[in-house]
Image: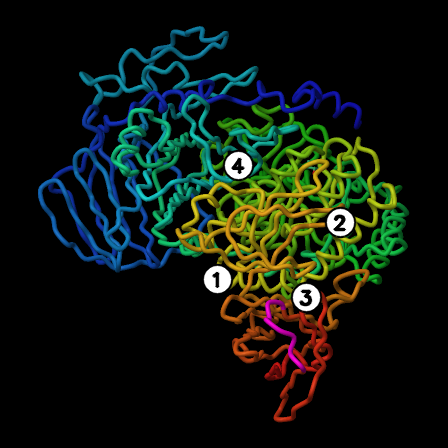
Amino acid sequence: MRAAIFLLLFCVVGLALGVDQTNFKTCDQSSFCRRVRKLQPGNSKFALVPGTLNTYSDSVTADIIHKDNQHLFVFKLEALQGNTFRVLIDEKSPLRPRYKVEHALKDTPRPGTIKVLNEDGNQLTIVSGSNKAVIIGDPFRIDFYQDDVLSVSVNAKGLMNFEYLRTKPNTEAKNEVDGNVEAAAPAEATPDAQNAVKPAEDEDPGAWEENFKSHHDSKPYGPEAVALDFSFPEAEVLFGIPEHADSFVLKSTSGTDPYRLYNLDVFEYLIDSKMALYGSIPLIYGHGTQRTAGVYWQNAAETWVDIYTASNNVVSSIVNFVSRSRKADPPAAQFISESGIIDAFILLGPTPMDTFKQYTDLTGTGNLPQLYSLAYHQCRWNYNDEKDVETVSENFDLYDIPMDTMWLDIEYTDAKKYFTWDQYKFPNPLNMIKNLTDLGRHLVIIIDPHIKRDTGYFFHNDCTERGYYVKHADNRDYEGWCWPGAASYPDFFNPEVRKYYSDQYLLSNFKTVTSDVMFWNDMNEPSVFNGPEVTMYKDLIHYGNWEHRDVHNLYGHMYIWGTFDGLIKRDPNQRPFILTRAFFAGSQRYAAIWTGDNTADWGHLQHSIKMCLTAAVSGLSFCGADVGGFFGNPDPELFERWYQTGAFLPFFRSHAHIDTKRREPWLYPEKTRLVIQDAIRKRYAYLPLWYTMFYEHEIDGGPVVRPLLAHYPKDKDAFGIDNSFLLQDRLLVRPVLQQGVSKVDVYFPAIDDKKTGDLWYDVDTYQRYEKSGYESIPVNDYKVPVFQRGGTIVPRKERHRRTSLLMQNDPYTLIVCLDREGKANGTLYIDDEKSYGYRKGNYIHVNFAFENYRLTNHFIGTPKYDSKSWIERLVIAGLEKVPKSATIVIDGISKQLDVLQQGKAVIIRKPGVHVRMDFSLRLNN
Ligand code: NOJ
């Protein structure tokens, strides 16, 4: 069977090295992208209809007209709380309702209030808090100001487009286009278009049906694209729109295809590419030294994004140079979606962190994960049987390498029927699970959305009988190919299907796992090996009679929502862990992501940072890449450096393709094994920091991993840096990402335009760096260049254990790195690491502050969690001289402590203070 599937894969996606790009559309091969891209800037046909304006306490509405075809639209501008606006445009009387995205926002956005400032002929100005929106009537445009600074302009380039729904012209003549048979352009458009200039959609041969390779898209509703441009007058760089294997800062699309957002299973994807990948978040940011702003384009259909950088246009960049003004031709993006409505959230910042939080305010933050899921995961396709799982687990202990979670890929199932086990390889899963959990380990198993069409399979029979599968327009169940062979795809948009699916996770149904087993949802783009572009046909029908075209990018999101619900039903007091490959805006509420099927080469290692940084600013902090690379066999050096990088990215899992050589650490030379052990131990030492950061992410939405510009918004030289990242504002990580190097150039960012730097301390040596700019740091095989910012305190746990569970009661070390004023502070978060008790206040959240040679703690809220941990050690870096001693006062009782010098830091051992106690510790000089 597997041979057949590989043969199929070979035919469908090609087994050559690197993606076969001909399997995926270019903009020119996609009718709506091709026709919308023909629009030229500066020629907008849309205008507000005079006399239709209405103002309400939080919004304004008006009609918009297309001046050539006279078609009418309704426009609404809503002010929301938190420097955010929402722009909605739909047809006034569409032939049928147009799809509006549901389930991406966490709930209804909180309305703000508006005041009309003035209204004159062609222009209306409204004010909402410190924000202002100027709506210009003809041509239609909106300028958004934050604190009187123009931050986002909507339709300033005049690239708005809105193809209204129309009846199909009865011209049946066929044209031959590029070897594909496509419908001819209609002789006449709709009645209201008579005597008008024909829009591009009436001229394009693919508007009413379209072929790609052997696949036909019937397009029963014809052209229905929407597009709009957003300019960022204050920006120097644009970033966002995951998922692409590209630089953090977006590149100009002049002369290339636009970036594409269409969830796709891309076999052996390329790096430095604008091609679509597994997930889509239509969210973009514009950032400059003074301001950041963002736009969330809420549309789940296939979307292309054109990027205009200031250098696109040579003439205007000369003008910019001469006038020293960016504003003449600022960076801009045009979103082009195949269907749906215009629904855009304007995030006015003004700082990068404000803007990131405005987005998570709308779509939610990631839930605090169970602590073990932040530790190290061991995966491969596949661990073959129960013995294999046991041996791998034992070997981690034998070689003294921490490991928390074993993973099982698709081969554990009975013939790729999910919720079943292969009875020969895994005759006793409960026993296997118990063996792992007895050691403090966990198991994660894969469950995919394709359902094997097998009349002996309960899931298939239930879905067939109850009509749960995605359907063809004639109501037949859709059938495609995936791992099980013939498969169908449940329609997770249907609440009844989601309920059925989520019920399968109940232990009364899935009896061969325990509530400690968690799940990996893969292939949920959805991947269909024999479908167009390895996914579903766009004219398939979902719940509510929506076409797949309308909802494609949401399919995976709906699926993981079902999984999340299932796990909550299974055990309401245990936080679910789910890993998903496909995602959309809001998916952070349910799952972690990884960057899919990367390759064992240095370029893919480098892209793991770029891709996770982009995901993190788009709400998805819990991101990682397959350590070692999925395809191919990493040589020892690449493998070592990949572990070192993975150890500092949020989701840390080694994974490999079934055809690769086994690569458990002990199968490599001893030195490699020791380097890997060291990297994983570094991860475990920082688990208290990871856990604290994820808690704070849940609370305030700030990304856990951050680009340098998040905290150094004024340093232009930092904007494009994507080989380094920050963990909150505490650590700067710049892993070794190149072969054979003995030093790396680390960029220390500047706080201001005078190039003042923060102080940074090498976390291994406490060597201090004081200047901004590049610094050459020597590296040996073990070195991971990581620096703690002066002014921060970082908690660590330093005992070596087999798993994170066994570290639960271990003592803490606080690393205090002083700033130029001799101050530092930092938080620590502690709870039971597993349950939702923390939502009821059962936690400890404490801030430590160091000032005037004194360290004190301050609890944020009442410390309720009954932790057994103590503070075992303090490390203080940045003192001018070694203090003679220290005095700690706990509960009015003082105790004298020794201070030791260790390299460039001082150590205070055994302050003997419990994490729930107030204390004050003074250094005696
Ligand atoms: C594709 C996933 O990206 C990969 O990680 C997994 O091993 C295979 N599917 C098999 O399940």
Q: Secondary structure at mark 4?
A: loop
Position of residue 14 in the picture relative to residue 394 (left or right):
left
Quick check: marks 1 and 2 in contact, CB under 8 Å?
no
Position of residue 88 in the picture relative to residue 799 (left or right):
left
Q: Label 2, on which residue?
A: 782
- Give the magenta part as a residue range: 877-884
Disc 3 from disc 1: Cα separation: 22 Å
Asked if the stretch drawn in magenta spans residue 140, the answer is no
The N terminus lies in which quarter of the figure? top right
Position of residue 585 in the picture relative to residue 831 (left or right):
left
Q: Label 3, on which residue?
A: 796
Sequence-first disc among 1 and 4:
4
Sequence-first disc among 3 and 1:
1
What residue is shown at x 51% (from left), y 22% (from top)?
25
What residue is shown at x 80% (from left), y 52% (from top)?
677
Name which residue type carries label 3: Arg
By secondary structure, the bulk of the magenta-drawn segment is best described as loop
Name the mark nearer the viewer: 3 or 2.
Answer: 2
Depth order, front residue of 732/772: 772
Depth order, front residue of 413/775: 775
Name which residue type carries label 1: Asp
* Residue found at the far front of this picture: 881
Q: Label 1, on which residue?
A: 700
Disc 4 from disc 3: Cα separation: 32 Å
* Residue found at the far left of this picture: 121
